[in-house]
Image (spheres, helix red, strand yellow):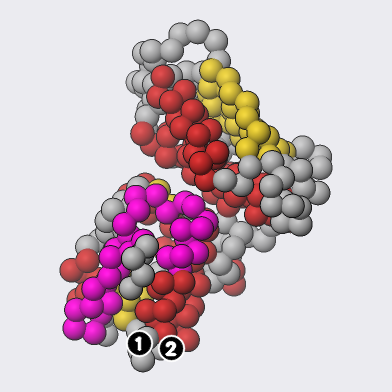
């Protein structure tokens, strides 16, 4: 899915000039473990010159992806079941993959929370926020792995 | 109020004013605590008038939006009123994307929100 995310230009003269900054981790439903990956992701983005608005978009999408993995994917699994998180950051784009061990879900079956009749329903906004803030979002056939791509907006 | 409260609360005239202590309203455990604390405030009022200020908040998640919807529903069941104020433009955009700016009464400043209570 491609859309027009909302963010200001990212620096064209990023400090990072090598290959992608990659990270792979197995995380449990633990705030400290998740924040450690998030910190590494944001450090990589900062090294590549991404703007504050881009960091906001990616942080939100990452948090929603993690919440979906543990709260929905692992809903019926033992609480210590880990999920796998990978990211690769270049000055051009940020790729994040989150894979849970659950049975998967059908993203297109999630109700449209922006319809008037669903506005007061407390759940179901994570998937749409990821789609709104990332340029590309794809799921594997099982629906237990999401890959999301955020592309840098070139400065003028 | 419990000592581990994640909120600053004060009541002025009939309006309960709430501010978040945390800059990031992302963690589900925290969100649940916040939600339960606000629910107790609603329970304590006959016709609740709540003003929630986001002045200190940099990030929030869909779980936080869900908690706000639950709070709004609870207040409306008691014929009360909820106002939101001081929302950072980046966070306001999350409300716009989800169309929750149509559900909530959102004001730029706390003063504007206070004046809006009926």
Q: Are marks 2 and 1 on the same chain?
A: yes
The label number, if any, that marks residue A42 in the structure image: none
Question: Counting other residues with Cα less than 10 Å from the Cα at mark 2, is it few (<14), some (14-19), or many (20 or more)?
Answer: some
Mark 2 to mark 1 CA distance (whole Å): 9 Å
- Is residue B58 positioned above or below B19 on the image? above
The secondary structure type at the circle numbered 2 is loop
Question: Please, which chain is the residue tagged with disc 2 on?
Answer: B
Instruction: List x then y, in percent, for residue B33.
Output: 46, 65
* Residue picked out by circle 1: B45
Asked whether the beta carbons under mark 2 and mark 1 sit within 8 Å of each other, the answer is yes
Instruction: Tell me which label, 2 or 1, sits earlier in the chain.
Output: 1
* Residue picked out by circle 2: B78
Residue placed most toward the observer, A48 or B107: A48
Residue B7 part of the magenta-drawn span: yes
Instruction: List x then y, in percent, for residue B45.
Output: 35, 87
Instruction: List x then y, in percent, for residue A156.
Output: 35, 21
Quadrant (top left, top right, bottom left, bottom right) of the N terminus of chain A: top right
Judged left or right of residue B93, residue A150 is right
The residue under the point 37% across, 29% down is A51
Q: How many marks?
A: 2
Q: Is residue A4 visible?
A: no
- Residue segment shown in magenta: B6-35
The residue under the point 59% across, 63% down is A123
Instruction: List x then y, in percent, for residue A60.
Output: 49, 44
Residue A63 part of the magenta-drawn span: no
Query: Most extreme residue toward the top, as rendered?
Result: A18
Query: Most extreme residue toward the front, as rendered?
Result: B3
Residue placed most toward the observer, A127 or B24: B24
Question: Counting other residues with Cα less than 10 Å from the Cα at mark 1, is it few (<14), some (14-19), or many (20 or more)?
Answer: some
The secondary structure type at the circle numbered 1 is loop
Q: Is residue B75 visible?
A: yes
The residue under the point 53% across, 17% down is A21
């Amino acid at each position: 899915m491609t859309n027009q995310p909302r963010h200001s230009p990212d620096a064209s003269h990023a400090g990072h000039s090598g290959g992608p900054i990659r990270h792979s981790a197995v995380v449990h439903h633990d705030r400290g473990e998740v924040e450690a990956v998030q910190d590494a992701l944001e450090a990589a983005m900062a090294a590549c010159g991404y703007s504050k608005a881009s960091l906001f978009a990616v942080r939100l999408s990452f948090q929603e992806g993690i919440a979906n993995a543990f709260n929905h994917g692992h809903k019926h699994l033992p609480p210590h079941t880990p999920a796998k998180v990978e990211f690769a950051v270049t000055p051009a784009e940020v790729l994040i993959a989150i894979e849970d061990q659950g049975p998967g879900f059908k993203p297109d079956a999630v109700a449209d929370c922006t319809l008037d009749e669903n506005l007061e329903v407390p759940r179901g906004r994570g998937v749409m926020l990821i789609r709104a803030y990332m340029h590309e979002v794809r799921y594997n056939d099982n629906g237990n792995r999401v890959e999301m791509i955020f592309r840098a907006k070139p400065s003028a | 109020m419990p000592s581990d409260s994640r909120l600053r609360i004060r009541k002025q005239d009939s309006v309960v004013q709430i501010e978040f202590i945390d800059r990031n309203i992302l963690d589900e455990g925290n969100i649940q605590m916040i939600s339960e604390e606000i629910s107790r405030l609603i329970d304590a009022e006959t016709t609740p008038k709540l003003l929630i200020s986001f002045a200190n908040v940099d990030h929030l998640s869909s779980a936080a939006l869900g908690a706000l919807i639950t709070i709004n529903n609870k207040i409306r069941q008691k014929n009360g009123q909820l106002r939101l104020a001081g929302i950072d433009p980046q966070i306001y955009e999350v409300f716009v994307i989800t169309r929750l700016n149509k559900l909530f009464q959102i004001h730029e400043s706390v003063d504007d929100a206070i004046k809006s209570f009926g």
